[in-house]
Image: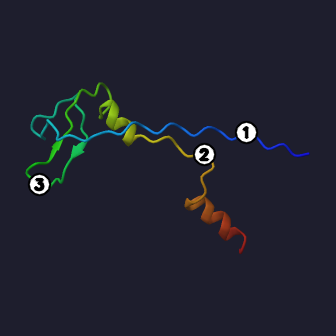
Amino acid sequence: RRVEPAPRPAAPAPAPFVELSGTATVLTLGAHMCKWPIGDPSSNEFSFCGRRAGESPYCVEHARVAYQPAQKGKKGGANELARALRRYI
């Protein structure tokens, strides 16, 4: 008799983050300020988040968006293509 493993619980979805207009410009952006760009760079309203960032280039909220965990076992990409081509060579 084959026993199926229990399904893994899905990772909780991050809380929605409402993007507000930034408080920093290129001229006012400091070392420990969030450098997440907001808006169209060609627009006069373009700015950066500007919240406290610590040692990271982004604040906590933007770091969650910028740094996604690696997907293990995800098919696709160059390695998968190379494996598929080896079958025919």
Mark 3, residue position: 43
Instruction: Give the residue type at disc 1.
Output: Ala
Q: CA distance from mark 1 to mark 3?
A: 51 Å
Q: x, y (%) of residue 27?
A: 9, 38
Sequence-earlier tag: 3 or 2: 3
Sequence-earlier tag: 1 or 3: 1
Q: Nearer the viewer, residue 64 or 15?
A: 15
Q: Nearer the viewer, residue 67 or 21?
A: 21
Mark 2, residue position: 72
Name the disc covering residue 6, or none. Answer: 1
Q: Residue, x 54% and y 38% (percent of image)?
A: 11
- The secondary element bearing badge 2 is classed as loop
Q: Residue, x 17% and y 30% (percent of image)?
A: 30
Q: Are marks 1 and 3 in contact (CB under 8 Å)?
A: no
Residue 25 relative to residue 83: left or right? left
Instruction: Give the residue type at disc 2.
Output: Lys
Q: x, y (%) of residue 74?
A: 60, 52
